[in-house]
Image: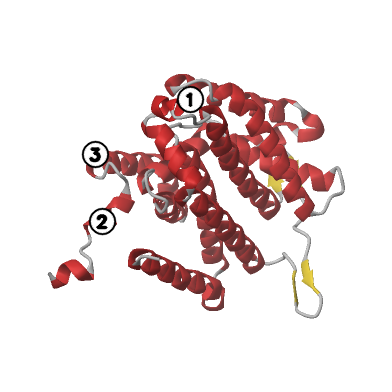
Amino acid sequence: MSKKNQRFFIRTAVLLMLLMIAPIFIKNEYHIHILMMIFYNIIIASSLRLIMTLGLVSFSHATFVAIGGYASALSVMRLGMSSWTGLIFAIIISVIVAFTFGFILLRLKGTYFLIATFAFGEIVLLIFTRWTNPFGGAAGLVNIPLPNPIVIPGLFSIIFKSKVSFYYLALALMCILLLIAYRLDSGRLGAIWAGIKQAEQLAQSVGINIMIYKNVAFTIGCSMAAVAGTFQAHYYSHVNPGGFGIFTLVNYLIFVIVGGTNRFMGPIIGAAIMTIFSEILSLYEHLAIYQTIVYGIALILVVIFVPGGIVTLFDKVPSNKSKKK
């Protein structure tokens, strides 16, 4: 392992330890909530960035967050499953939907793909809105049960009735999904996706099945977003189609672009910074209406002055080795 990777893993381990002990020192539940929203948005931004490594921009990503929330909620409320079985059920549903429609949508390129994914997302949200049974119509599903307790006999039990218990659930989901995304990004699949983005015809000429690899990235990214949707549904105890429209999607895109699309850490940094901005603005009623403006200004400034995203600013910080020279 190179020294650069060693430093990265050490810093990651230290940060993870700090996040694990944070609730001991942070007593304000609202601050705990902000951290949870950062974890939640990081999952979605990182999953969207996984698709964008192919040079594609999916306008149906927020819809897959909704699919995860609805699938999990319905599996618990109508089918009598546990919340954890519902989580698996939601992942399976999102994989089936993403993989099936991926074969249709991924044949399109550029603007056509963008428009097609937008249309697909709107159709799904329209179904959720129009079909009162089983989706609850425009009001959505309410009184979604809390996650089932996690009990390990003789060791511990986690009952999801407090902000802290949901905090650790969000942290665990984020860490698991980020680890999966990192292994994919730094492995053979990540190299193939990068090759497809840079020279699709060349990749196809050397025997790479473009459609399969594109669909794998699309399906994994969508299923990760669905996991975030299941957390949101059970945390807020309700889900409705109005929360997954075009403005929500634009926010997700801003997370990735502001942080940086070409680096694994990009969406993590972007989601954290923009979520904090959003929460600060929400504290002041007269400023909350300007959230869209603030997001827009941030996006414009990044595109003009830091085209590669905020993550590239760290490249300009001199290392200890360069200082010695």
Q: Which residue is mark 3?
A: 304
Separation (CA) of disc 2 from disc 3: 18 Å
The vertical placement of 111 against 44, above or below, is above
Give amino acid for label 1: Leu
Please indicate whether residue 320 sits to the left or right of residue 52 in the image: left
Q: Quadrant of the N terminus?
A: bottom left
C-beta proximity under 8 Å, tags 2 and 1: no
Residue under the image location 29 percent in, 38 percent down: 300
Q: Which residue is mark 1?
A: 114
> Where is residue 170, by image quadrant?
bottom right
Give amino acid for label 2: Asp
Give amino acid for label 3: Ile
Of mark 2 and mark 1, the one earlier in the sequence is: 1
Please indicate whether residue 157 sits to the left or right of residue 219 in the image: right
Please indicate whether residue 191 sits to the left or right of residue 211 in the image: left
Residue under the image location 69 percent in, 44 percent down: 91
Q: Which residue is mark 2?
A: 315
Determine the secondary structure under disc 3: helix
